[in-house]
Image (spheres, helix red, strand yellow):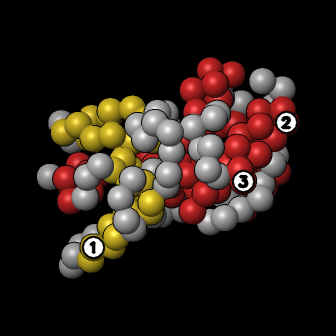
């Protein structure tokens, strides 16, 4: 069983997100050894001899909004799309980012990756983080900065 599928089975409901999802999408180049996930339950961590699993509680109106089911080594697992993983990152790290510069400088995300985002990506998850004004401000600011 692969790490992403195991993460989902260890603690449900959850989906792969944050650094691990951004790495799987190729948006961050650093090696990510911890499988980071979002959950609607209490935060949790599991250590195994091979993998560290970390689950962050991220309150949302629709928990699986902006999440796709991907196949990894023939197994299906829910994984955040890039913008959703960025929104979850902003939430978990309590950041006050409102433009692309923060993403480029702090996470070293390439401009080309950000340009793959479309208005529908934002429409899909904006309003989903109602109890997290910092995330909603990030989404609105980034959308404005990208002119979407």
Closer to the chain start, of discs 2 and 3, is 3
For disc 1, the marked residue is 46
Q: Residues within 10 Å of mark 1 (few under 14, many from 20)?
A: few
Q: Residue at x 64, y 52 (%)?
A: 132
Q: Quadrant of residue 130?
A: top right
- Residue 11 image offset from top left, x and y in percent: 25, 58
Closer to the chain start, of discs 1 and 3, is 1
User: SS of the residue at dot 1?
Assistant: strand
Spatial distance from mark 1 to mark 3, Cα to Cα? Answer: 28 Å
Residue 36, visible in the rendered structure = no
For disc 3, the marked residue is 134
- Residue 105 vertical position relative to residue 14 in the rendered view, above or below: below
- Residue 36 vertical position relative to residue 1 in the rendered view, above or below: below
- Residue 127 vertical position relative to residue 135 in the rendered view, above or below: above
Nearest the camera: 129 or 6? 129
Q: Residues within 10 Å of mark 3 (few under 14, many from 20)?
A: some
Spatial distance from mark 2 to mark 1, Cα to Cα? Answer: 38 Å
Spatial distance from mark 2 to mark 3, Cα to Cα? Answer: 16 Å
Closer to the chain start, of discs 2 and 1, is 1
For disc 2, the marked residue is 145
- Residue 115 image offset from top left, x and y in percent: 71, 30
Q: Residue at x 45, y 50 (%)?
A: 17
- Residue 47 image offset from top left, x and y in percent: 27, 77
Front position among marks 1 and 3: 3
């Amino acid at each position: 069983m692969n790490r992403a599928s195991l993460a989902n089975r260890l603690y449900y409901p959850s989906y792969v997100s944050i650094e691990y999802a951004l790495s799987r999408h190729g948006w961050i180049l650093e090696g990510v050894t911890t499988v980071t996930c979002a959950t609607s339950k209490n935060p949790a961590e599991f250590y195994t001899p091979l993998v560290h699993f970390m689950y962050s509680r991220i309150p949302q109106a629709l928990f699986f909004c902006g999440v796709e089911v991907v196949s990894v080594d023939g197994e299906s697992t829910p994984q955040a799309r890039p913008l959703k993983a960025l929104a979850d990152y902003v939430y978990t790290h309590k950041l006050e980012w409102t433009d692309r510069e923060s993403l480029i400088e702090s996470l070293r995300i390439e401009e080309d990756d950000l340009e793959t985002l479309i208005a529908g990506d934002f429409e899909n998850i904006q309003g989903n983080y109602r109890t997290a004004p910092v995330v909603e401000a990030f989404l609105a600011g980034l959308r404005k900065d990208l002119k979407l």
